[in-house]
Image (spheres, rainbow, N blue to C red):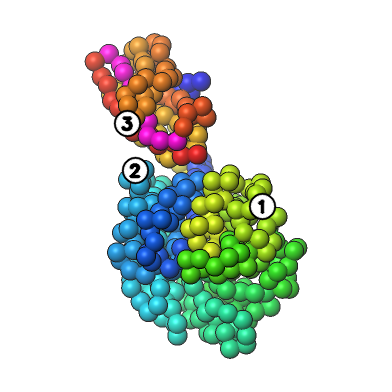
């Protein structure tokens, strides 16, 4: 089906409406990246990332700038140039990194918060459409059980709260990463949530999970470590039994308007709640395909976690006068990579015979999506590749003497 997109000419402000954009933010402990086995792990990472299709990816256990570049080229942009990395700061131990879609965000800064073990990093980005600034804090807190380690984690959180407590009220910020928390009673977790008079620096957990988290069947759907039961590649073993990976958000995001958390969107990716103390790829996995479950198992000992956030902007609306596109134009499809459906948008400046065709990697025409006369305007059409294998394809707009061809990728 072809959809016509209505465009309007704005002559003056007569009404202020709201435009909503949904953004997927993902946190992923990569397990000592790059290590010595990137050639083996890269295909698994690619399967995971293309399946999630994050708008922002925040990573932990990144070892170097070479690692940042390697993951960008070998994973994030393997199927097309969609992401850029934020500035990387090589601190003590392993570090945090960020990748973002350049069509949606502008990267502003990376500010390290020093702790006794590893830096906490404040990544600051601006949403292009709404101009809202979001601060993303990435953490990898002290590991292991015991009072001494719990106190070390609490001290790291104290350093973070000193920063967030100084922010203006109703600021937009989140904290994500590998927290190594074993229960809701941990001092560090309580410090993150603690409401303190005189500041607005506390965080909110979208889940209410009191008591012990480790090896608790009631919380099995939210465990994120470990994806495997046997030892290989330096990862933790024992199967899924810990909720280590979290995304918490500020009061500004909790409140309506601006940037808001999408209720019930927290997803420990690949966890179907049926793999307590088991490897994530033990069949059946009802949350993801077997190929994705295998990729999660072999790429890292942590599951990625994502949440959805709505960015709201004001838009002016005037329906007095229509305008038509000035020229023929074929846009990049979205999403790309697709799994398996994608949307193709195009502009027509005048009534014309329009053809939209799909070709495989060998140049063979495999589908015609449009072949008809269309009036001037902006249009979009969906293509489902459910009957075609994963791989590289091309789509072409033909209109009078104008032709344009673009590349798309299908990943299943």
Pick whichever of labels 2 and 1 is earlier in the sequence.
2
Dot 3 surroundings within 10 Å: few (below 14), some, or many (20 or more)?
some
Residue 126: quarter of image: bottom left
Most foreground residue, 389 or 344: 389
- Say left or right for 1 vs 374: right
Most foreground residue, 370 or 359: 359
Q: Is residue 268 visible?
A: yes
Dot 1 surroundings within 10 Å: few (below 14), some, or many (20 or more)?
some
Q: Please give the residue where the numbered disc 1 appears in the rendered image.
A: 272
Against 254, residue 182 (above or below) is below
Mark 3 and 1 residues: CB-CB less than 8 Å, in contact? no
**Does 398 appear in magenta?**
yes
User: Outermost residue, left direction?
Assistant: 401
Pick whichever of labels 3 and 2 is earlier in the sequence.
2
Residue 205 percent across, percent down from the top left: 63, 65
Residue found at x 46% / y 39%: 411
Mark 2 and 1 residues: CB-CB less than 8 Å, in contact? no
In the rendered picture of this protein, how many numbered marks are placed on residues? Answer: 3
Per the picture, the main secondary structure of the magenta-coloured stretch is: strand
Pick whichever of labels 3 and 1 is earlier in the sequence.
1
Residue found at x 45% / y 85%: 116
Residue 80's label in the rendered image is 2
Q: CA distance from mark 2 to mark 1?
A: 30 Å
Looking at the rendering, the stretch of residues picked out in magenta corresponds to: 390-400
Q: Please give the residue where the numbered disc 3 appears in the rendered image.
A: 406
Most foreground residue, 51 or 127: 51
Q: CA distance from mark 3 to mark 1?
A: 37 Å
Residue 271: quarter of image: bottom right
Residue 370 percent across, percent down from the top left: 42, 17
């Amino acid at each position: 089906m072809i959809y016509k997109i209505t465009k309007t000419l704005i002559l003056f402000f007569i009404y202020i409406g709201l435009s909503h954009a949904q953004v997927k933010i993902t946190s992923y402990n990569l397990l000592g990246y790059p290590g010595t086995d990137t050639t083996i792990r890269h295909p698994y990472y690619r399967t995971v990332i293309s399946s999630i299709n994050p708008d922002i990816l925040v990573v932990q256990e990144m070892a170097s700038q070479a690692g940042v570049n390697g993951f960008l080229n070998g994973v994030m942009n393997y199927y097309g140039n969609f992401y850029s990395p934020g500035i990387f700061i090589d601190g003590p131990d392993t570090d945090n990194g960020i990748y973002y879609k350049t069509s949606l965000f502008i990267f502003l800064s990376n500010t390290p918060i020093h702790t006794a073990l590893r830096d906490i990093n404040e990544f600051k980005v601006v949403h292009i459409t709404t101009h809202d600034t979001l601060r993303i804090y990435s953490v990898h807190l002290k590991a292991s059980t015991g009072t001494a380690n719990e106190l070390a984690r609490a001290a790291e959180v104290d350093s973070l709260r000193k920063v967030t407590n100084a922010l203006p009220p109703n600021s937009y910020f989140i904290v994500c990463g590998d927290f190594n928390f074993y229960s809701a009673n941990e001092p560090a977790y309580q410090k993150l949530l603690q409401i303190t008079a005189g500041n607005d620096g506390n965080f909110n957990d979208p889940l209410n999970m009191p008591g012990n988290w480790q090896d608790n069947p009631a919380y099995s759907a939210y465990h994120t470590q470990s994806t495997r039961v046997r030892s290989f590649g330096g990862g933790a073993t024992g199967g899924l039994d810990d909720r280590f990976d979290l995304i918490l958000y500020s009061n500004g995001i909790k409140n309506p308007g601006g940037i808001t958390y999408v209720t019930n969107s927290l997803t420990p990716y690949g966890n179907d709640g049926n793999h307590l103390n088991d490897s994530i790829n033990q069949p059946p996995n009802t949350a993801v395909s077997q190929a994705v479950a295998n990729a999660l198992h072999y790429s890292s000992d942590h599951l990625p976690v994502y949440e959805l956030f709505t960015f709201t902007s004001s838009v002016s609306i005037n329906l007095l006068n229509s305008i038509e596109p000035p020229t023929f134009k074929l846009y990049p499809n979205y999403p790309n990579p697709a799994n398996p459906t994608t949307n193709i948008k195009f502009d027509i400046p005048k009534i014309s015979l329009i053809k939209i065709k799909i070709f495989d990697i060998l140049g063979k025409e495999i589908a015609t999506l449009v072949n008809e006369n269309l009036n001037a305007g902006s249009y979009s059409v969906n293509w489902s590749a459910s009957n075609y294998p994963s791989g590289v394809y091309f789509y072409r707009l033909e209109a009078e003497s104008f032709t344009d061809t673009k590349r798309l990728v299908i990943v299943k």
